[in-house]
Amino acid sequence: MPKPAAVTKKTVVRGSRTGRPVMALLDLLGRRWTLRIVWELRDGPLTSRALRTACDDASPTVMQARLSELREAGLVELLPGDGYRLTPLGRELMESFLPLHHFAERWSKRMAS
Amino acid sequence: MPKPAAVTKKTVVRGSRTGRPVMALLDLLGRRWTLRIVWELRDGPLTSRALRTACDDASPTVMQARLSELREAGLVELLPGDGYRLTPLGRELMESFLPLHHFAERWSKRMAS
DNA sequence: GCGTATCGCTACGTTATTTGTAGCACGGGA
DNA sequence: TCCCGTGCTACAAATAACGTAGCGATACGC
């Protein structure tokens, strides 16, 4: 097993030495594809391969790693038959991200001008 | 590629920069230390070294790379004498991030139990 | 049964990114 | 002058991600 428990073993290390939860979240979300995965799951469950396709065909290696981390973080769950979906907690995360989505629109317009 | 549209649910955009601002933001923030830098600048300007110390002593190489990206994105600026600080736009980003900060608290409590 | 398809997931070699350490040029005091 | 602190960079080592292939399991149609 190459990567059994990344979140509770490494993430929390790098992020939460000070005990601030936001650091752990910053560390978890500051990895490639993590935020994207949550974002792509906003409209419903996706199979691992559909998720991979949705995420610019990210490599399955890192995809599985992120999914394991997100599952261990209680944000994503696997439903046999339907694929992956956000847990209620993961949905909270997604909704908390919405202001950033709206900011992206303003940011884009501001940068274009 | 192998799967055109197995999931007819959303037909997700492929390519982060093909038109959706949120993808560009996701791409920018999905890099190590980027979100952390914005977060650490929330209370005022910091010198590059103070910022590095605040960010768990991140290497100066990646620090400068992120700062260049953030400056190019119009989110951070350098004031000769005071160090780096958020631009008004960067402050908007930081405020948009606050819900995620609050979520982190709930997430931490939920995970602890 | 068999062949084929999908699913979640993994092995492994190659490539890209990050790290750690050292150091540069510049400027502002003492 | 020398000493600091600033922003910033070089460069090899370590790490993370990529890309391709493939596994075992499951579910179909034949």
Image (cartoon, coloured by chain):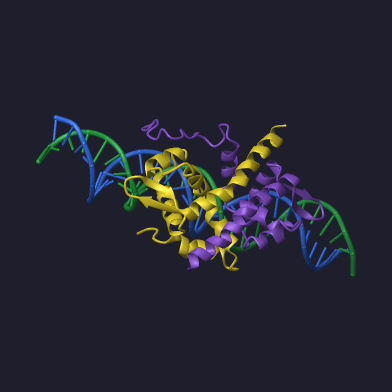
Chain colours: A yellow, B purple, C green, D blue
B107 is higher (above) or lower (below) than C4: below
Q: Which one is in front, A79 or A51? A: A79
Q: Quadrant of residue B45?
A: bottom right
Task: Classify residue C9 as left or right of residue A28.
Answer: left
Question: Of residues B43 and A103, which is closer to you in this image?
Answer: A103
User: With B20 as the anchor, is D7 left or right in this view?
Assistant: right
Indicate whether D23 appears above or below A5.
above
Task: Using residue A52 as the reference point, say whether residue B28 is left or right of it.
Answer: right
Evaluate whether residue A82 shows in this view: yes
Q: Position of residue B51 (x, y in %)?
A: 69, 58
- Position of A3 compared to A90: left or right? left
Question: Can you see residue B31?
Answer: no
**Residue at 57% across / 57% down in the picture?**
B103
Identity of the residue drawn at 46% across and 64% down:
A8
- Along the line of sight, the residue nearer the viewer: B22 or B34: B22
| Quadrant placement of the N terminus of chain A | bottom left
Q: Quadrant of the C terminus of chain A?
A: top right
Residue in the foreground of this view, choosing between B26 and B8: B8
Residue B70 % position (x, y):
67, 46
* Residue A84 image position (x, y, % from top left): 40, 48
Identified at 81% across, 51% down, the residue is B80
Q: Position of residue B82 (x, y in %)?
A: 80, 56
